Amino acid sequence: MKRSARNIAWCERYLRIPEGRFVGEPLKMAEFMKEDFRLIFDNPHGTRRAIISRGRKNGKTVETAMLMLLFLVGPEAKPNSQLFSAARSREQAAVLFNLAAKMVRLSPELSSVVGIRDTAKQLYCGELGTIYRALSAEASTAMGLSPRFVAHDELGQVRGPRDPLYEALETATAAQEDPLSVIISTQAPTDADLLSILIDDAEKGEDPRTVLRINKAPDDADPFSVEAIKAANPAFDIFMNQREVLDMAEAARRMPSREAEYSNLVLNRRVEANTPFIVRSVWESCGDPPIESFKGLPVWAGLDLSEVNDLTALVLIAPVEGVWHVKPTFWLPEEGLYERARQDRVPYDVWHRDGFLETTPGKSIEYEFVADLLLDLAEQLDIQQIAFDRWNWRHFKPWLLKAGFSEEYLEKHFVEFGQGFQSMSPALRDLESALLNQKVAHGNHPVLSMCAANAVVQTDPAGNKKLAKHKSRGRIDGLVALTMAMGVAATYEPEPERKFQMLVLG
């Protein structure tokens, strides 16, 4: 019996499906997983490194857990072996460990010989002396280890050509006679990233001990076609949630800011991380005029303060029957307005004439005018929170106090809102969802529409997003303010409708 056939038979005999609607049932390996095993274990040269790359939700973590258990307590196990999985974060490291632990607990045979240390993220077999541990890039060191098996989980999230944890573990395997490193991941964004470098080197075929299995959509394929999706996802017709994937394709077709994520995670393509935020048709589909007055409604705001002479934006939003109504205000310095219009090739002077753009006296933005308007709004409206970028706060706060705001009001209602991935990503997702579902009414305000058309979204390896001012095609301040407003309004829940009972007296 070939080595791969023996290992496949062992997995199907002793392992159970760890999650989903078929949890606890005997595991039956998909044919593409069996082919992975054949390439890894039947390589006549012996396999030192295996790189498996395909779209998400194709059982990559399950397959990695199967391989690890083979080396922990299965036919590949050798006494006193160290096994590790490496991930970018503690949370990600826990995913593989938790899945493997579930497989152990569901198997009567494995649970009788494998111990589980949940806190330490370890599995061990006392009889063989083998031990598995989940590591993260946040670990202090990987020195002193001597692994026989290493699984690099989602190495495509590493930006740049080097990763200390990867290098430490790969160096540590040198002490072993027949170590195996397995990389199972979607592709990295660019050619300069570590996983891309490893894949490109493997494609040259110069090292027969390196096995490469990559599923991706062809470059010339329609990215939104079922054919392209199937090319990158061998599990599409087996156990994938097809509806979810097709919905992602449709969302990416309508919202360019989601296209990079879709191309990477579903089509398994290398993609640059910067994309336009929105297509014109989606933005215009939300062009209904906002209601006349926000009085009596809960109101949130985003404030993007300019640097001296740039565009300053204040955007108010209020919910009405599930739709976010939007009212923006923009300021530019009065002096040099026409020249700035010519320089930016934007009709600031016309917008000012038509009432869509305010000006302040002089060559720079006078914060006094912004502060006075905010005080008027605070006195008239039920403002919940105003999100702001802390960059110019120390210059702006004195004007708020001079206008009449109290320290107590500022502390309660003004919220610092970061411009990085952590704060921006969930806010952008909320805004995208609202726009796609026509839950926004912005009235096609020309300045705000310009900002939306210029906006570019930057995506990190984990799929988080932020607006990239320095890479956008023009001013985006209004969209930044709208995104911040959506971010602080995220916890809003409309009050349930009151139900009345009619009492009929006879």
Image (cartoon, helix red, strand yellow):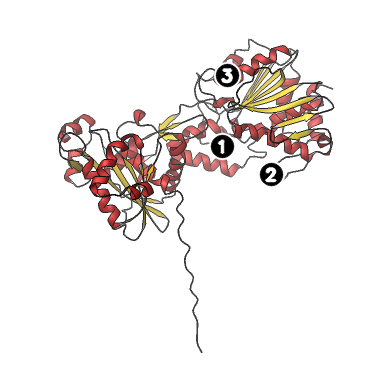
State left or right for residue 7 relative to residue 491.
right
Helix, strand or loop for disc 2: loop
To which quarter of the image does residue 482 belong? Answer: top left
State left or right for residue 290 relative to residue 82.
left
Residue 253 coordinates in the image, percent (x, y): 46, 39
Estimate how packed mark 3 is, as few (under 14), some (14 to 19) or many (20 or more) residues with alpha carbons within 10 Å.
few
The residue identified by callout 1 is 226
Report if residue 59 is visible in the image. Answer: no
Q: Residue furthest front?
A: 407
- Determine whether label 3 and label 2 are within 8 Å by CB: no
Q: What amino acid is found at the position of numbered circle 2 in the picture?
A: Gly
Q: Residue furthest top?
A: 206
- Determine whether label 3 and label 1 are within 8 Å by CB: no
Q: Which mark is residue 115?
A: none
**Mark closer to the chain start, 1 or 2:** 2
Q: Nearer the viewer, residue 169 or 211?
A: 169
Mark 3 or mark 1: which is in front? Answer: 3
The residue identified by callout 2 is 20
Estimate how packed mark 2 is, as few (under 14), some (14 to 19) or many (20 or more) residues with alpha carbons within 10 Å.
few
Residue 300's place in the image compared with 461, above or below, is below
Q: Nearer the viewer, residue 124 or 324?
A: 124
Q: Determine the CA span between mark 3 and mark 2.
A: 35 Å
To which quarter of the image does residue 239 belong? Answer: top right
Query: Image point 77% across, 21% down: which residue?
Result: 81
**Mark closer to the chain start, 3 or 1:** 3
